[in-house]
Amino acid sequence: MTIAIPSALKVETRTKVSSISLFVAFAVLALGLAAPFLVSRGAVQDLFFILTMLVLAQSWNLLAGYAGLISVGQQVFVGFGAYAMFGAVILLGVDPLLAILIAGFLSVLLAIPTAFFTFRLYGPYFAIGTWVVAEVVRLIFAQWKALGGGTGTSLPREAMRDMAGVSLLRDLFGMKPAQASDAITYWLALMLAAATIGFIYRLLRSKQGLGLAAVRDNEQAARAVGVDARRMKALVYLATAFLTGLAGALIYVQKARISPDAAFSVTDWTAYVIFIVVIGGIGTVEGPILGVILFFLLQNFMADYGSWYLLMLGLAGILVMLFAPRGLWGAFSDRTGIQLFPVRRTLVGGPSIHQGGSSHG
């Protein structure tokens, strides 16, 4: 009997569908870059809304769906990032685009003491703790007279007019300052959304992603095999603070007007985000993408129904949780096996044994 050398085992996450979806994603990205030249200004603003909500939803999904940290206070980083951007522009004279990046890093600095407090709480107490922190920060900014206090303030017109890139678009394509500003913020939202999805997908496919999944499924068991659960959760919390702070600053560059109640709105920046993740599919990269599209369509279809709009959203969320606990994408994936962003690891290859005769002299 002759035994062949076993073939090497390989761990793969990519599938044929995911390879095809990668090319589709690049095509969509290229088309998205051309959108300001192809569609109306109103459509660009709608796309901006979808992309920024997608960033918020992917960030919350990473926090809750993979790290098991259910937060109802993520509006703290939206509001803080927005106010940090306003402060840098109004008080320091910084260009709004640079101020967005500053806001992201300052949001991480805010997340450090926030994590020190909230990480001492577990389960529903953690969720309540994050909301309390958000309310405290909102009250602090409501007292800051230099940024409008409780009534808020607006970005200076000259800051928006002189924002990096506006004059270039005006000279090259004849865009008006407002139209150029919308195009620039849209492109930034597109890049931020693509970077957020890429970062999360790469993280989930890494060794750290394995540790994160272990912490989510069974924290005690994960610690028993050497995973530093607290460190993993802290890193995810800081990463989501950075992404959410960037998104908040970008949203309010586009709005150009801020107030504490709007910037720290639990409905706009947390409740809607949770709804998007729940109906799309928590714990999946694809879920928030599907969820934000459905949310946008529902919002536009039912916006004229007043308070019934919120009731219908709530009913839709309840029905999904009852009949598709893993969200619409989760139900679809379970039935078809299709994953556009697969993170499950599969062993490919293995030992092969070949039998053959052998003669002895």
Image (spheres, rainbow, N blue to C red):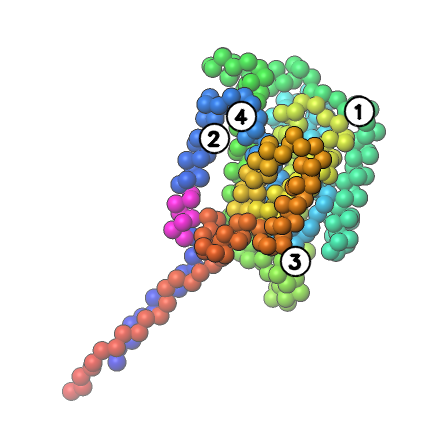
Specify start and end residues of the magenta stretch as a single range: 15-22
Amino acid type, mark 2: Gly
Amino acid type, mark 3: Ala
Kindly indicate the quadrant of the structure image that contains residue 176.
top right
Residue under numbered circle 3: 229
Taking the magenta stretch, the answer to whether it contains residue 164 is no
Q: Position of residue 199 (x, y in %)?
A: 54, 44
Q: CA distance from mark 3 to mark 1?
A: 42 Å
Pair 3/1: label in front: 1
Q: CA distance from mark 4 to mark 2?
A: 12 Å
Would you call the spot at circle 4 few (<14 residues within 10 Å), some (14-19), or many (20 or more)? few
Lower position in the chain sequence, tag 4 or tag 3: 4
Contact, CB < 8 Å: mark 1 with mark 4? no
Lower position in the chain sequence, tag 2 or tag 1: 2
Numbered tag placed on residue 43 in the rendering: 4
Q: CA distance from mark 3 to mark 2?
A: 38 Å
State the predominant SS element of the stretch in magenta. helix
The local secondary structure at tag 1 comes to loop
Residue situated in front as seen by the camera: 36 or 159? 36
Pair 1/4: label in front: 4
Pair 4/2: label in front: 4
Q: CA distance from mark 4 to mark 3?
A: 43 Å
- Above or below, 346 against 118 in this view is below
Residue under numbered circle 1: 151
Lower position in the chain sequence, tag 4 or tag 2: 2
Kindly indicate the quadrant of the structure image that contains residue 305.
top right
Contact, CB < 8 Å: mark 4 with mark 2? no
Pair 4/3: label in front: 4
The local secondary structure at tag 2 comes to helix
Q: Position of residue 6 (x, y in %)?
A: 34, 69
Residue under numbered circle 2: 32
